[in-house]
Image (cartoon, rainbow, N blue to C red):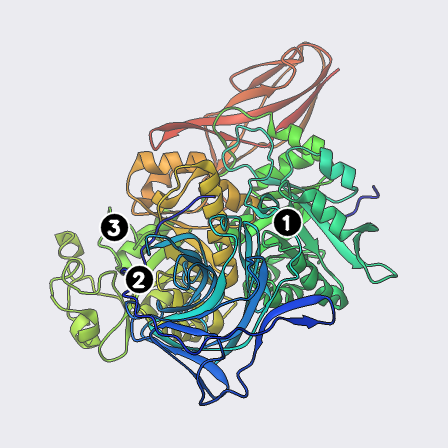
Amino acid sequence: MSVNRKQRRRVYPLVLTSVMAIGISSFPSGISTPVQANGLENVLVEQNFDQLTGQALPNGWKLVEGQASIIDGKLQLTSPATSKPSRVIIPLEEETGDYVFEADMTFLAAVEDTRWASMMYRVQGENYPYYQFAIRRGANALNGLEFAIRNEGNRWEVPVKTFYPEPFEFNKSYHLKIVAKGNRVQQFVNGQLVIDTDLASQWTKGDIGFQAAGSTVQFDNVKVSTNVGELPPIESTKAFLADQPETTIVNAPTVLTNFDTVEEIKNVEGVSSAILPVHANDQGELVVNETPLAEVIDTMKGKMIPVFQVENENILSDLQEFIKEKALQDLHILSSNAKMIAQVKEGIPSARGAVLYTKNSLNKHDLEELALSIHENNGKVAVIPQKLLTPEIVHYLHSRTISVWGMGGETESDAHRLIHLGVDGIIAEDEQATVQAYSQYPENTIVQRPIVAAHRGVPSLAPENTMAGYQLAYDLGADLIETDVHETKDGHLVIMHDYTVDRTTNGTGSVSNMTLEQIRQLDAGIKFGPEFAGEKVPTFREFLQGFKGKDVVLLVEIKQAGIAEKVLKEIEEEGVKNQVLVQSFHLGDVVKSHELNPEIGVGYLYSSGISATSEGRVTDAQKMLNYASRMNANLNASYGSLSEEFITYMRQRGMVNLHWTFRNEQHLGDQLEKGVIGPITDYTQWLTDVPIRLETPIKKRNLKVGDSATIQAKAFMNYREDRKDNIETNLFVSGDQNTVAVQGNTITALNPGKANVFVTHTFSILGKEWNLVGEPIEVEVQ
């Protein structure tokens, strides 16, 4: 089944070390003679050290400071601390800075994961200034990989920081490559482009070298060559917000199109992404509708997000190579075979996965299996035909941080239907009709309320992290219940936010220094109020058992580092993997949790500053999404870390994130207006009485001029109950105001024609006025 049914620069200064004390020593002078390779490649340096074990450094190489020697056929640098680095400089005979510099690097030891090694280039005056490609042992940290500058003042500037999907393992070799041409530099790890910048403009020529800081590292297979072609302009790879329809809908779904022609891509408006069903033609070239894939991508670059649809396993390798050659990072892989997504992500870890659902029905069992399969195969999006979708299905997937793209936007009515189903994206057959639908809604429209995560229960009404608080959160309609897990001295998992029991119980002491029996003797309710006296600190197992099989998702934060394996074991033993998400501030536990059971979704908790410029905010969103995609995690940032650009960027790219912790009504209202879908809050009760959606009994009405009709709408108040309540509503007319008139809930036909009439319920919460809007009624007047 194919989705396509058509026939037609900123610098962030960071001081990493104090100014180095320079003690220069050198080995005998002499420069390697440049070698011509096959008459095409000018090789300035080529060294594998095989003949040099036990000898001094190669002829002409200079030890600037620290320790360096040839051991076991490799160049080994040893540094006890970042304040005592080791550096080797390799003078080049040819005065140039346009070269390809590559080597294999292996960490043997590191004082801690923040310590690093680097390849230096364009070194000036046998010391500094210079540029460097720095790699931390913990390369999966946000600043694990760097384009760094040692400036003329002998201090660090780090304009570009990024990460690798995993820490660099000890005793494992990684191939590093730097391509420098003019002010353009690209830095690679194992053939994958990790840093792409145009900030190398201060020095255009210079030597190369190696450095270790707080680590012991080996380099091998060193090569420098000068056959450097022109690198693409940086503008072609920078972060961008795609186009979207003008609308007054809060958190409106993004619009996707099925690719038809390149000309259509150039002219379409209001569309963020294009579905590209990729196949190989008779010549083995990758094409989309017989248009070369390269031509399609060149047309889309910086304008639309590519969604590569692959159904043939035989093209996966070629597609991976194509993506690497084009240096693409902002992309989706779509397939009806979820395992193909996992296969592509092995080579392209920044890719995001979308699973195309192709069965003719979608029952409760199918839905559960779909969600588990999406997580297991590193996906983030479910692509489902409109005819199978219901608001309950969308809510089920949202509560498990899975985005939903609905297929079938063939008409304006289809677009309205999909909008009111609550989808995150509409794959439109008629983009113009879909975009038109977005323009018809009243100000501050919501079509259904956000999913709500109850933070530690409802600590504004009951003692935090207690079964009483969790039950209250459930009764108030929370979609998720958040909790925190620690391990006791005797190896049991218990619920506690703090590292000590002091704040929330009548006891004192660290959780890790107390036994389960000691903790169970504590009163976790008395400090909140006498009505909760006797409330116990729950075990993690009790928490899971308390809500097993109930219509709620358990959001489990691993508070104590290193306990992921025990947490996942108890989740599996209790048989609740289908209703659990795991999150943590500890990156290692996020990664470990996904490795232990990839069917369970994971989230990375973090907080960060917000850039002062719109471009910076979009770039930061791209960086964080790439980071999350490589871990197959969601980005559960503090709400103070959010910008409107971040929220839009994530929505356009199929991410459902949860954001913490809302304790201020105005702040929650402001973020909901920007499009936040998953607030984590201490005040679940703020949203309890907000209807989840409106429903009208009819979708079309025929009237004659002069006739009137009264519309009665009902409100759904809770996803757990099939209960509809009468609610005060009004009518709103979009478009031609001469066809019908509305007053209260009554429509009066004025003149022949058609009009869309919306039922609205206006209410005030969080210091703002909102319009909950039902699916439009198409009125035809004869």
Q: In the rendered structure, which disc, 1 or 2, sits on the residue that comes first in sequence?
A: 1
Q: Position of residue 209 (x, y in %)?
A: 46, 68
- Per the model, the C-alpha gap separating discs 3 and 2 is 13 Å
Where does residue 35 sit, x and y in percent of width and height?
Answer: 65, 72
Depth order, front residue of 660/681: 660
Front tag of 3 and 1 = 1
Q: Mark 2 packing: few (<14 Cα in 10 Å), some, or many (20+)?
A: many
Horizontal side of residue 410 vs 484, given as left or right: right
Q: Earlier in the sequence, mark 3 or mark 2?
A: 3
Observer-side mark, 1 or 2, equals 1
Dot 1 amino acid type:
Pro
Which of the two labelled residues, at mark 3 and mark 1, occupies the earlier sequence position? 1
Residue bearing mark 3: 459
Where does residue 626 sit, x and y in percent of width and height?
51, 55
Kindly identify the residue that appears in the image at 56 percent across and 69 percent down.
102
Q: Is residue 80 visible?
A: yes
Give me the residue at 40% from left, 43% from top. 642
Residue located farthest toward the right when viewing the structure as drawn: 282
Q: Amino acid at mark 3?
A: Pro
Q: Nearer the viewer, residue 781 or 737?
A: 737
Residue tagged 2:
484
